[in-house]
Image (cartoon, rainbow, N blue to C red):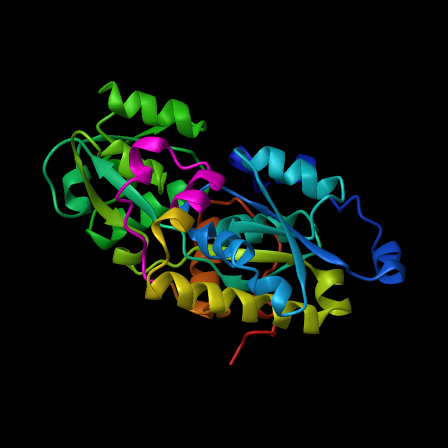
Amino acid sequence: MKRIILGILMIALLLTGCATDPAAVQNEGPKTLRVGLMPDDGILPYLYGNQQGFFSNEGIEVSFVIFMSALDRDAALQAGELDAIYSDVVSLVYYAEAGTPLVAVSSTQATYGIAIHEAGTDANALAGKSVGLSTNTLMEYLVDNALSEAGLTEASIEKIAIPSLPNRLESYRAGQIDAIALPEPLLSLAVLKEGNVIATAESIGLAPGVLLVQSVWMENAPEAMEAFFAGYDLAVDGLNAGAKEEDLLAIYAEAKFPEPVQQGFVLPTYRHAEAPAEEQIQRAIDWLTARDLIEGEHSYKSLVSPLLQK
């Protein structure tokens, strides 16, 4: 029988159905879009847009809550405290497998990468090394795709399961593991004193970040979601044009970036809101299927909202 291993998210336990009553949401109607975020660089346009009033100016009120763990975020979702969550394509399929009424609406732009102590310019440097990650999650998905891109197999490395990001980072900095998979800004923190980044999701053709929204919210308020993304696009334009340093430092602090990386942190070039690409969703489905982690039938059409599809 196929296994449904949800790793650090433990979605099958937490999210078999959502605690929010869809009928109640329909009766009340959406008022404020409540979004659960995780502390990485992909959330900065959301925080900047809120800081600058772009969302409210477009006619939608938003409330962002930053969680330090996916488990806490998912518990808040289960309790009906969130309308949307900042997540990834692997988790998206897990949610669908668990029957959770969420759809991917847009891509997000967090930087996920692999750092190594020794010299190297790509994932070939991982051969024979120990790599700290969380198993059956986005981090292992990233590592496996990086290995494949380099012509290596899983047998080429030793995977060390360290679910906690702080513990994983500490193990790396203490020299207990050779390499590590992390999101920004922890990725920059890992190589602050030594080592270098040898691969990122972007460098190997992955775009795994997605914003997931409650299906009933999407059905009841498509105009509100359009207003939300209009505000997001304004925030992207502002960040790309060059925001004031005091504004950036304020959102870095709000995003819980470690102080050592706040000064001089290099922002990525952000893109306007867009639907996840079908190829990105299918890659995640294929990876999970090959590892016997899902047993249901999932497709791009069933997982992704048409709102931003062109």
Residue nearer the viewer, 188 or 77: 188
Residue at point 36%, 26% (across, down): 168
Q: Residue furthest left?
A: 119
Residue nearer the viewer, 299 or 67: 67
As drawn, 231 above or below 110: below
As drawn, 271 above or below 43: below
Q: Quadrant of the N terminus?
A: top right
On the picture, is 23 further left or further right than 50?
right
As drawn, 199 above or below 172: below
Total number of numbered labels?
A: 0
Asked where in the image residue 176 lies, by quadrant, the reply is: top left
Question: Can you give x and y, in whole percent of width and height, for residue 180 in the image?
Answer: 29, 34
On the picture, is 114 further left or further right than 103?
left
Residue nearer the viewer, 194 or 310: 194
On the picture, is 193 further left or further right than 167?
left
Question: Can you give x and y, in whole percent of width and height, for residue 23 in the image?
Answer: 88, 58
Residue at point 39%, 49% (across, down): 248
Residue 11 on the magenta span:
no
Q: Is residue 302 visible?
A: no
Asked where in the image residue 103 lies, by quadrant, the reply is: bottom right
On the picture, is 106 further left or further right than 23?
left
Residue at point 57%, 42% (across, down): 2
Look at the image and give the residue range highlighted in magenta. 249-269
Question: Can you give x and y, in whole percent of width and height, for residue 238 in the image?
Answer: 41, 64
Residue at point 51%, 51% (across, down): 47
Question: Can you give x and y, in whole percent of width and height, for residue 261 in the image?
Answer: 30, 37
